[in-house]
Image (spheres, rainbow, N blue to C red):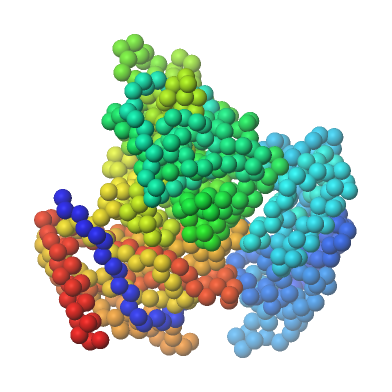
Amino acid sequence: MAEFDHLPLVRLPRLEPHRKTGGFPPPPSRNRKVWGARIRSELDRAVVAQVSRQAIPGIDPSLILKVSMTSNLAEEEWRRSGFQILAQDRARVLILFSTDLELTEFRRRLESYQSGPLTDKGNPSHNGLLAHIENVESISPEDRLGPRIQQQGIESITSIDGRKSFIVDVEVWSAESRLSCEVRTGKIIEFVETEGGDVRSKYVGETGVIVLRIALKGALLRKLCHVTEIALIDLPPRPDFGPTQVSGVTISDVGTPKAPPPTAPLIGIIDSGLSKHPLLEMATIDSFGVPQSLGDADTNGHGSRVAGIALYGDVYERVTLQDFAAPFGIISARVVNDQGRFDDKAVIAEQMENALKELHARGCRIVNISLGDADKIAYADGRATPWAATLDRMTRSLDILVIVSAGNSANGTRAPWGNVPDGIVTGYPRYLFEPDNRIIDPAMAACVLTVGSLAHGNGLRIDPFETVDIRPLTERDHPTPITRVGPGINGALKPELVDYGGTAVFNGGTQKLMVGADWDSAGIVTLRANYRDALFTAATGTSMAAPRVAFKAALLLRRFPDASANLLRALLATCASIPDVTIKKLEGAADDAARRCCGYGTPNVEKALSSEERRIIRFADRQTLEIDQFALYEVPIPEDFRRVKGRRHIRVTLAFDPPVRHTRLEYLGVRMSFRLIRGMKQDQIYEHYKQRPKGEAWPDLPNCNKCKLDPGYDARSTGTLQSATLVMKRGVETYGDTYYLAVFADRRWAGQEILSQSYAAIVELMHEGEVKLYQQSRLREEERQRARQRNS
């Protein structure tokens, strides 16, 4: 089959501010005098309660209040009332900050609401704000106890043993400037050290993330729970390595390993370090610890297993072919200690930022993180974490593709299939969609690629003595029994991709779930850190699926060395599909089960590397669009696509990297979206979508001109990687030879200093018949170029 270069996706020069739709719901009907009095009373009690809290010497007094709302309103409404929004969650609870202890402006508005004149529409002044308030209260000490502490049975400060020693991560509310953040953090550190605590590290991020790692006694922990400026106190993250027991088969002859070429892409591995494995060593460009005191050796073995798959893709195939010529280089950043835990001194957000900066400085454009917080269900409390926000900020600032595993299901008493061991046999795959089986931190990060896992087979051995007690759970392409599912932040599609990560079998005799670590045929073949015992081992989990995607991303980067991280994400999504057997297996398991489990599916990277005669990819990379504007792209439709009968599709993919803020329910500072339009002229589309004076009617856009893409707008619009497909079976001659892709950028909470948003866009045309799409498209491109030359 002939392979061709991809074609350009041409953007029209005209830009327009676009109209906004929607808005906030009307406030409930209130008796303004009664309701105003209630808000005033609750406000007074909350202020008194906060004044009595533990004060930190040297920090200017301020108020931090918790307000429950019937609807989330624009931040500007609160700013005009004298507040800054610190955080919000999906239960419509706002955390508000004010330096004005008297709350002068808010009380003035409250007085006007209660007793002032009515507006022309008969509403009280400031009704849109105050009538939406449900209640006002102070933040309680228990509000500051994080989920990992609560899982230890500490649900109130009275249950904290004052004599017990703890190591905790303390998240501090952000201040209005970087200098203020530093000052506030410094004063809290002074207080902690005066009270006998040991501040082991601090991290003050660029986007308001402030975290301290503190060793302290329970008595001081109780005091910190009363400190106004502290947002959350929790135990440090625990790595989600999965089973650590390993087994393997020694392979005596694997061919001669070869080092990668000098120009090969470099893949960064943030994990437990690397061993001196002979099939890794010649491809290891560099390795280091973050912090440096950790060293770079892989005492756990996890990092070497991950790196083996990232370097070679299908390791079993390499063994079969006896081909270990490394296509890429590997650089390792070790972030866990010899006990397989994150460093006791370093805050995880700081570790990740430093590791990503170091990897980027050494030339890595692709980074794999097959780690997660085993105790932190992603977005369970309604907001992202500092770890996730740091990954998103670094992908945006460094233009790197970060690939993260979705996490593995907990075993034992927290297993999503229940406390009965063989519940997994009857519960699979329904239990995958239980709340406890959601993706874990940091897999919810918006700008990373999150990867779930599919089974490579049923996991049975070719063994005549195998007993009936060994129960397979899957066939090939069924979800791995321990994979985790989405959605992500604000319902975003997560994981976006899946790949092979092994399976599990149930041993009825021992009542034990067995994965690749203890039943080799259930796992994916990879490299064993302790290579003197055996070169290879087997492992199961999303930790093994993620580096398979990293391998494919590196193939794309080798083919397109100037590609942005957005384009790499978009190409992987465009070439991905959910296997039919996966869809069939998940039927009836949950609403939209296949998407929640598999995202866009498994990437077939060969399709992304080149176009074909019957399948064309057009792309536009490193695009920028001013906020609240929209742009149009031409999508030429070849004659054979329009006229030759047969199944065909148009697939559109958009990837962008917005600013984020982890304290916000609206995590993304900018949202982007797209529409595919057919049967209309450019001017008609501009007229329909452009911004208009208030009260002026919009031109109609008939349904036949709106391409019905799957997944639909609502299902895809909250993610930063959006891919949707229009499938056609009948002729489409009536819609002309040009469709148009409209791309929109919408400001959410991003400030006016954010002027534009970068992105990449792809349109793929595919026809299942014998057609000449590429040839016809190439001729049309040449005619356009000649016309432009004549006009110039």
Q: Is residue 127 above or below residue 483?
A: below
Q: Residue at x 84, y 37 (%)?
A: 162
Residue 766 location, quadrant: bottom left
Q: Is residue 766 above or below residue 99?
A: above
Residue 691 location, quadrant: bottom left
Determine if residue 10 is in view. yes
Q: Position of residue 342 (x, y in %)?
A: 63, 39
Q: Residue at x 61, y 51 (%)?
A: 354
Determine if residue 424 is in view. no
- Residue lying furthest front: 262
Q: Position of residue 241 (x, y in %)?
A: 54, 34
Q: Is residue 369 above or below residue 505?
A: below
Horizontal side, residue 516 vs residue 146: left or right: left
Q: Look at the image and tell me in which quarter the C terminus lies.
A: bottom left
- The residue closer to the viewer here, 132 or 678, is 678
- The residue closer to the viewer here, 476 or 548, is 548
Q: Position of residue 63 (x, y in %)?
A: 79, 65
Q: Position of residue 158 (x, y in %)?
A: 82, 41
Horizontal side, residue 203 vs residue 285: left or right: right
- The residue closer to the viewer here, 443 or 415, is 443
Q: Residue at x 79, y 49 (%)?
A: 225
Q: Residue at x 70, y 36 (%)?
A: 152
